[in-house]
Image (cartoon, rainbow, N blue to C red):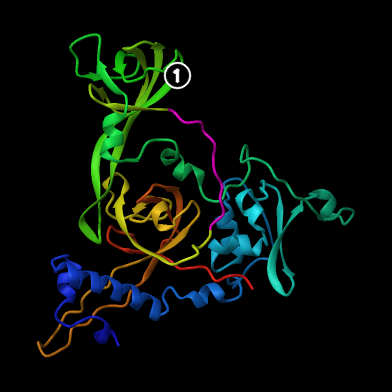
Amino acid sequence: MIRSIYPNSKFACWRYNNCGGNWAHTMRKSIISFLLLAGFVSGSVVADELKLADNAPDSYVVVKGDTLWDISGKFLKQPWRWPEIWRLNKAEIKNPHWIYPGDVIVLGSCDGKPCLRLLKNTKADGRNGSGKLSPRVRVSPLEGDATPSIALSSIEPFLYKPLIMDMATFKAAPRIAAGPDDRVMYTAGDQIYAVGLPEAESGDTFQVFRQGKEIMDPDNPKQFLGMEVNYLGDVRVHRSGDVVTLKVVSAFREIQIGDRMVKTPERNFLNYAPHLPVETITGKVASTYAGVVDVGSLMTLVINKGALDGVDVGTVFFGYKAPRSIAKEDKSEPDRITPPIKSANLFVYRVFPNLSYALVLDSTMPVNVGDAAIAEAATPAE
């Protein structure tokens, strides 16, 4: 079966991107077909009833540091399906019922299917039998000790800083134009000057960034997807004008003449629920943050699919290791490859037109640039 999908003489050149364009395109389609036909990312998984985790508890007391993904993973083999086991409607998925440390989650049955209920913990009263567990529902912004969908500490550095730009946007951004002396690098406490900020007011804060590496499409190395920019620090407007006077508030790296700026956005954590897309999206890992080679759980990577491809915040991809060729002991043997192996769940938390940033969850092996990233279409509810 495998040999009928992968032509014998071509696998090696596909793997190292040395093939002609038409054959490589055909091979990429064949690999995705193999993944789907082999059942590694089968729609039947989505259509199945919710599968409880082995040794799923009858109840669980929420503790600080939990996430909704982690909590649901205690009850489900597929933690990305937590909106289903919580039986949330579409409105609630966008603004879920927040859960707090000390809350009690009880596994029950709703219409013959497993479901979770959030109950109020009566502590001592419940232990002596004089009290009881009663339903409680909270709907509020994500703040304080509220339990988030995924680990906010892992994604916060990527939520409010410029990460991906096209060259035109980068060149049009306000720039650091001069310093008060002949130095070429500046750090916290220094005064510097910028241009391109006609509407800046005293007290406004801006993030400073510098051009970074270009991100190319793994499926087409000549196709530019976006430019990664490097965050340097923060500056505050001291005096407005055609030439704006700034003070460097913080410097993660030294700031130089020619670096660009963007106004600091308001901090407002989003907490969208995980979901599968309406139509299957097939992509690859295009890049990793800070050049990390082996990406593990709670680390960020870049997928070569974005808003233009139907990706939105909360889309769940599944990472798969690329097939590897099997060594021959005799030239007469046909070319063979290993079947793809699932390596991790990938939760998209920030989306650009052609790219997405995803948090790696539940990884069983390192995720690398070039690995497959597939978001299988959700099966409509009956």
* Position of the C terminus by quadrant: bottom right
Q: Secondary structure at mark 1?
A: loop
Name the spot of residue 341 as percent of width and height, x first: 36, 72
Q: Viewer-proximal residue, 316 or 291?
A: 316
Residue 366 appears left or right of 184? right
- Where on the picture, by quarter, is residue 212? top left
Name the spot of residue 206 as percent of width and height, x first: 40, 24
- Where on the picture, by quarter, is residue 304? bottom left
Seen at 69% across and 72% down, the residue is 113
Q: Viewer-proximal residue, 243 or 344?
A: 243
Residue 331 colored magenta?
Answer: no
Give the magenta range: 264-274
Name the spot of residue 123 as percent of width and height, x first: 79, 49
Name the spot of residue 316 as percent of width and height, x first: 47, 60
Seen at 26% across and 26% down, the residue is 259
Return the residue found at the far bottom: 332
Please identify the dominant SS of the magenta region: loop
Seen at 45% across and 40% down, the residue is 159
**Pointer 1 residue:** 204
Return the residue found at the far right: 130
Q: Is residue 230 above or below residue 198?
A: below
Q: Amino acid at mark 1?
A: Asp
Residue 54 appears left or right of 171? right
Looking at the rendered structure, the number of numbered marks drawn on it comes to: 1
Q: Is residue 38 above or below residue 285?
A: below
Callout 1: few (<14), some (14-19), or many (20+) C-alpha neighbours within 10 Å?
A: some
* Position of the N terminus by quadrant: bottom left
Seen at 57% across and 64% down, the residue is 81
Residue 360 appears left or right of 105? left
Residue 141 appears left or right of 294? right
